[in-house]
Structure formats: structure tokens, C-alpha cells
Image (spheres, rainbow, N blue to C red):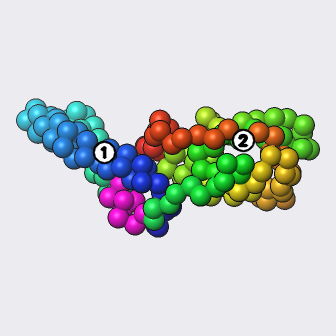
Amino acid sequence: MNNELTALDIKKMQEELDYRKLTLMPEQIAEVQLARSHGDLSENFEYKAAKQALNKNKGRMRYLEKMIKTARVIEDKSSADEVGLYDFVEILFVEDDEKETVQVVTTVRCNPLESRISKESPLGIAVLGKKVGEKVFVKSENGGYTVEILKITKSEDDGSAPLLSY
């Protein structure tokens, strides 16, 4: 995997992993045992649902453990006038004459519906390290498009953006 994550990303993942191991898993095991005690397992929906929830939790724990184990810790090294990690960037889509503000984040915090784009996305790659007034071409499946950097608002990474979860 070797995802590039900040120290805060890893800390938040460890907190989620600890919660899932120490709090959620014992509760789910108890739910499975209670549902099992109700008799015939072949027609016991509560048992099946409890087992599914337990297995989903175990899968998420394996994912978190692997991410933490293989992560490469990064820091934002952008200057004050460049787009860096966790900065808010107002961009103009030149061809459409439309403005949008996005935040460039690590892959575990991206959420396009909330305008948080991954630094590894085509747009994230294109704008990182750029300055106000620069126009950059963003490569995409359909060829690409041009954006202009209108404004950069520096952000201290306070960890408020949630991690991706399923």
C-alpha cells in the first residue's frame, strides 16, 4: 500500500483501531453470542446480522492495521504562497468560467462531495505547489481541462476532516 499519510492521519487511524478493538468488538461478540442463544441459526436473522457486523468490523480493523503499518509519513513543505496539503484553493475552471473552492487532502480524508480532493487525484497533483495566478492543465480520462489558481487559504491541519470509512 505505502500510502502517504500525515502523522495526524496515522494517529486518527490508531484511535479508530483502538476503539474498534477495545469497545466495538467486545460489544459485537456479545451480540453474536446473544443471537446464537436464540436457537436455530439457519433462520436466525439477528445472528446473521450480528455476524455480518462483526466481520465488517474485522475487515476495517485489518485495513487500518495495514495502512498504519505500511504508511509513509509526509509533511507539507509548501511555502506560504504555494498550494500545500490541507490548503483551501479557489480555482477557476477556465473553459466553463466556473469557480470552486477545494481542499487538498491525503487519500484517507478525500471526499469530493465535500470538496476535499486527494493530493493524488489529477486535480490535486496539478494544483499542489502552484501559486495564485498560475494556470495549469489537469489531465483526465476525457483529455483534460485548464484551471487557474485564484486564491490560496492556508490551513492548519486540525484533524477535523474525517477519515474514510465504510
The disc placed on residue 63 is none
From the viewer's perspective, is residue 99 above or below residue 128? above
Q: Nearer the viewer, residue 84 or 127?
A: 84
Residue at point 63%, 47% (across, down): 104
Which of the 4 image quarters holds residue 90? top right
Which residue lies under the disc numbered 1?
A: 15
Q: Amino acid at mark 2?
A: Ile
Q: Amino acid at mark 1?
A: Glu
Q: Which residues are magenta?
A: 64-71
135 on left or right of 33: right
Secondary structure category for the residue under label 2: strand
The C terminus is located in which quarter?
Answer: top left
The disc placed on residue 152 is 2
Secondary structure category for the residue under label 1: helix
From the viewer's perspective, is residue 2 above or below residue 52? below
Which of the 4 image quarters holds residue 35? top left
Q: Magenta includes 93? A: no
